[in-house]
């Protein structure tokens, strides 16, 4: 029996440690730990509420748009204008998010996950004319010429022993890794058209956005989107399929907790009640038995039995929270969010599954076609490769939809509504980051932030055990996993990375109250 | 048995063995050309502390000097950056990642720090890896790497001054690199490249200058920022400056006039966003109808006052601006209160 500690887990966002106990080649126990604490909620208290969307964007440099949108939705509801957002404002928010979702998914597959499957050395004797492969070949050549393997950083050292792709596919994947660096940049340029810049853009405001559509900016967005759609259809999706075919055993790896949750994302109307608002990707809770139910935000709680906080678990909390770094038994800066007391996974796969079960025709066709290709039942969605495939399909879904949303913009029409900060109010914003469900809650007193709370995707997925000792989704995915070579635990990191963890989001939490929800006003 | 690329493999390869990589160096077309050149590799350790990864993502967006230039080819002619350690892109993980770090710090390297350094509880609030079963704090790592580095670039406002990670009450007792070096008695030169995030040009341009002529060749201001990028204020170069002078102020987002009343920090912010534009010259904040939020200043955000409330201009050199402070009070955009920035600086 051996313990494998992977710290740091790299090619994710933030500081994550994974510890697994392996016995006879099988993971018997697993712990996921967030190793950074920042304390956003605490320092936002007393600020002007409109600061919130700028501050919370800085929770995460990979998904700032998601925090920005969630925060303005939260303030829209607190300021009583959630049902007054003009169509242009609603659509431009969607377009800003779409660009970042596309960027994030491309980044995740090629630059975060692929190096666990793709062998960069396949480029070493490349003799063709692909400029990206030539760059990689010469890069390797320089290290060889100097006789210095250290010059192969950041691509070496690495785990060894399970790079199975045939040479031609491998070389193509390396070429596409290089190409994808340009593509994710292009997706960010597209976002910046309406966001002002990215990361951390100023283009979102309570009541809408800061600039309206023009024939010129619609055309610019569409130009970039067209290039990206071509890449998604003809490079990204085929690459995911090619990798999945060779690593088909990973359809059996990483099942997880078997329950998923989606808040829904991309608004199609401005209903003040976020549980009733129509969304391009719907809200809901589902499970591996393929049953679907409505999502009730009041059923969300956060446990802290194993977290470095002295807050009482769940709610109602009673005031002063203290970070408690050396609390007995605690092993992480993450809390354990639960829905109706159950462990739930969030992310692209949960969103796609909820849409699939909601009867979305486009999603159903995409997912069914993919499952047919692999001769697999829907249950394989709950696997390492299922998560990658769902992410890639979602990338296409969102990119195709964004093209249609451009047609709905009306230059010259309003794109925001003026607002006034209320003396006292409560608000809630529910949205989806590329990595999953994201919720912000606010209480305002004397026109200032009294409480601001965020429950973020990776807190769900990377959560520790809860008060009932139920392990979190990633922990459950790891327990039972087969590990062929303890010195090169590919299976472990592949399972973890398929969730696309974003720890900077997850470890910022410190709430003056254990209650996630509070009372929110439905205008 | 694991296969590792090692010196021995290269020796074997050079001898024509087809082991490991399945190739022969003597058939490798670029080999002789590369041998004939004496290329310079500059190892870089990029270390992340209390931050959000936004600086790294911003640098990924660099153009026309591309991220491929940084990762694979040249940044300046004949000089290669060898990014040995970067948590977001490196293949290595866990013990291998730690090994890559330890191996790199045995020779000369440039240190890039992203994110602030939490001092609280001996650094327990940010652990960056593990050795012998114990978490290694950011503080310990930077205290060890700092003196060895040939130069340090603090990328982003968190690494420059604590930034958002040090917003009062600064729970994790976060400081920037320069302040940390001062406390530890580390004398390695630090160049601050603040911004939340910084424009990729500010970082790449500074790095190129360091690679060409050494850190001492970079002219900096009192906040250790390169004058080449941070020499003028946004306000002094703003295309809306005319409406400011004419006292024409936007009262709602989306209006074309000066954004002062909506909280623009342009008058106190040193940066060149307006001529540089962001994301491959796509846009910049004010062009998108949003006020400058002052993210390139070391006081950002906790010591610059509320983001959408007007700043007090009486402390700036801009005497013409003082007259409009009264106008600010009567505009009900955000129940505007003219805010005095605290004047204190974290990290200095």
Image (cartoon, coloured by chain):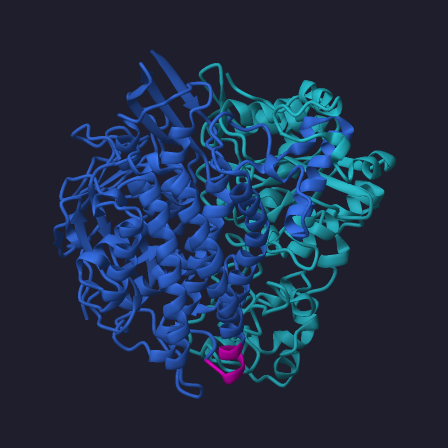
Chain colours: A blue, B cyan
Q: Is residue A99 left or right of residue A431?
A: right
Q: Quadrant of the C terminus of chain A?
A: bottom left
Q: Is residue A281 left or right of residue B209?
A: left
Q: Is residue B5 left or right of residue A497?
A: right
Residue A9 pos. (x, y %): 46, 32
Answer yes or no: is residue A62 visible. yes
Q: Residue furthest top?
A: A1
Residue A214 counted in the magenta span:
yes
Q: Which of the two residues, B193 or B162, is positioned nearer the viewer here?
A: B193
Residue appearing at x 51%, y 25% in the figure = A160
**How many numbered marks are there?**
0
Q: Which of the two residues, B91 or B325, is positioned nearer the viewer here?
A: B91
Query: As displayed, is residue B264 above or below residue A371?
Result: below
Q: Quadrant of residue A345?
A: top left
Residue B8 pos. (x, y %): 69, 18
What is the chief secondary structure element of the magenta stretch? helix
Q: Which of the two residues, A177 or B344, is positioned nearer the viewer here?
A: A177
The range drawn in magenta is A213-219
Query: As displayed, is residue B199 above or below residue B252?
Result: above
Answer yes or no: is residue B196 visible. no
Q: Quadrant of the N terminus of chain A?
A: top left
Residue appearing at x 64%, y 50% in the figure = A132
Residue A36 counted in the magenta span:
no
Residue appearing at x 30%, y 20% in the figure = A26
Residue appearing at x 58%, y 54% in the figure = A179
Residue A489 pos. (x, y %): 42, 25
Residue A228 pos. (x, y %): 50, 64
């Amino acid at each position: 029996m051996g313990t494998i500690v992977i710290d740091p887990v790299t090619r994710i966002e933030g500081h994550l440690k994974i510890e697994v106990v392996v016995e006879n080649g099988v993971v018997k126990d697993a712990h996921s730990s967030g190793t950074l604490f920042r304390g956003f909620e605490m320092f936002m208290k007393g600020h002007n509420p409109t600061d919130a969307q700028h501050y919370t964007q800085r929770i995460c440099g990979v998904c700032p748009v998601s925090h920005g949108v969630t925060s303005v939705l939260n303030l829209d509801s607190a300021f009583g204008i959630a049902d007054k957002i003009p169509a242009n404002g609603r659509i431009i928010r969607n377009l800003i998010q779409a660009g970042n979702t596309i960027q994030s998914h491309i980044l995740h597959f090629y630059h975060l996950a692929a190096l666990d499957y793709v062998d960069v050395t396949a480029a070493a004797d490349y003799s063709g004319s692909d400029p990206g492969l030539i760059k990689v070949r010469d890069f390797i050549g320089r290290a060889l010429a100097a006789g210095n393997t250290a010059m192969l950083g950041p691509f070496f050292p690495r785990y060894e022993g399970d790079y199975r792709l045939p040479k031609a596919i491998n070389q193509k994947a390396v070429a596409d890794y290089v190409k994808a660096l340009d593509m994710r940049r292009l997706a960010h340029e597209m976002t910046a058209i309406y966001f002002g810049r990215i990361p951390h853009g100023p283009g979102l405001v309570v009541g809408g956005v800061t600039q309206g559509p023009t024939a010129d900016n619609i055309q610019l967005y569409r130009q970039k989107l067209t290039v990206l759609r071509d890449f998604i259809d003809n490079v990204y999706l085929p690459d995911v399929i090619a990798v999945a075919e060779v690593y088909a055993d990973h359809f059996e790896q990483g099942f997880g907790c078997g329950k998923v949750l989606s808040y829904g994302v991309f608004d199609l109307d401005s209903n003040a009640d976020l549980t009733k608002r129509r969304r391009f990707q719907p809200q809901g809770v589902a499970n591996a038995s393929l049953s679907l139910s409505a999502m009730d935000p009041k059923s969300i709680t956060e446990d802290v039995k194993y977290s470095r906080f002295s807050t009482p678990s769940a709610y109602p909390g009673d005031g002063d929270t203290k970070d408690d770094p050396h609390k007995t038994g605690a092993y992480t800066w993450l809390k354990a969010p639960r829905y109706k007391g159950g462990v739930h996974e969030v992310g692209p796969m949960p969103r796609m599954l909820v849409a699939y079960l909601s009867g979305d025709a486009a999603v159903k066709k995409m997912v069914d076609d993919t499952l047919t290709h692999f001769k697999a039942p829907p249950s394989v969605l709950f696997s390492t490769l299922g998560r990658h495939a769902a992410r890639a399909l979602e990338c296409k879904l969102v990119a195709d939809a964004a093209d249609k949303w451009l047609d709905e913009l009306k230059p010259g029409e309003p794109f925001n509504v003026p607002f006034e900060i209320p003396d006292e109010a409560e608000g809630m914003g529910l949205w989806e980051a590329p990595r999953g469900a994201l919720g912000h809650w606010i209480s305002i007193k004397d026109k200032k932030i009294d409480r601001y709370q965020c429950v973020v995707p990776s807190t769900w997925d990377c959560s520790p055990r809860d008060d009932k000792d139920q392990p979190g989704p990633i922990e459950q995915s790891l327990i039972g996993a087969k590990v062929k070579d303890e010195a090169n635990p590919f299976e472990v990191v592949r399972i973890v990375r398929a969730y696309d963890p974003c720890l900077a989001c997850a470890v910022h939490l410190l709430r003056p109250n254990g209650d996630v929800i509070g009372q929110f006003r439905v205008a | 048995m694991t296969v590792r690329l090692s010196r021995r493999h290269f020796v074997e390869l050079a001898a024509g063995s087809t082991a490991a990589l399945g190739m022969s160096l003597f058939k490798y077309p670029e080999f002789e050309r590369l041998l004939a050149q004496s290329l310079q590799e500059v190892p870089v350790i990029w270390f992340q502390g209390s931050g959000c990864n936004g600086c790294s993502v911003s640098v990924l967006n660099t153009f026309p000097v591309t991220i491929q230039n940084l990762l694979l080819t040249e940044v300046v002619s004949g000089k290669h950056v060898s990014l040995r350690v970067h948590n977001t892109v490196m293949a290595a993980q866990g013990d291998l990642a730690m090994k890559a770090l330890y191996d790199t710090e045995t020779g000369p390297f440039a240190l890039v720090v992203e994110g602030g350094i939490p001092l609280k509880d001996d650094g327990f609030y940010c652990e960056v890896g593990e050795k012998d079963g114990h978490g290694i704090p950011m503080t310990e790592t930077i205290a060890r790497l700092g003196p060895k580095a040939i130069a340090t670039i603090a990328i982003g406002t968190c690494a420059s001054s604590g930034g958002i990670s040090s917003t009062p009450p600064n729970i994790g007792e976060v400081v920037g690199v320069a302040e940390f070096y001062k406390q530890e008695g580390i004398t390695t030169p630090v160049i601050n490249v603040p911004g939340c995030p910084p424009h990729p040009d500010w970082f790449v341009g500074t790095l190129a200058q360091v690679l060409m002529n050494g850190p001492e060749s970079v002219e900096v201001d009192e906040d250790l920022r390169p004058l080449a990028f941070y020499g003028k204020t946004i306000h002094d170069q703003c295309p809306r400056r005319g409406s400011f002078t004419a006292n024409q102020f936007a009262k709602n987002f989306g209006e074309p006039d000066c954004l002062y009343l909506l909280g623009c920090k342009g008058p106190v912010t040193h940066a060149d966003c307006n001529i540089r534009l962001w994301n491959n010259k796509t846009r910049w904040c004010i062009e998108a109808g949003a006020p400058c939020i002052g993210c390139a200043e070391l006081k950002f955000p906790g010591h610059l006052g509320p983001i959408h409330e007007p700043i007090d201009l009486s402390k700036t050199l801009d005497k013409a601006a003082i007259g409009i402070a009264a106008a600010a009070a009567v505009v009900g955009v955000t129940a505007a209160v003219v805010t005095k920035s605290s004047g204190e600086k974290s990290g200095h």
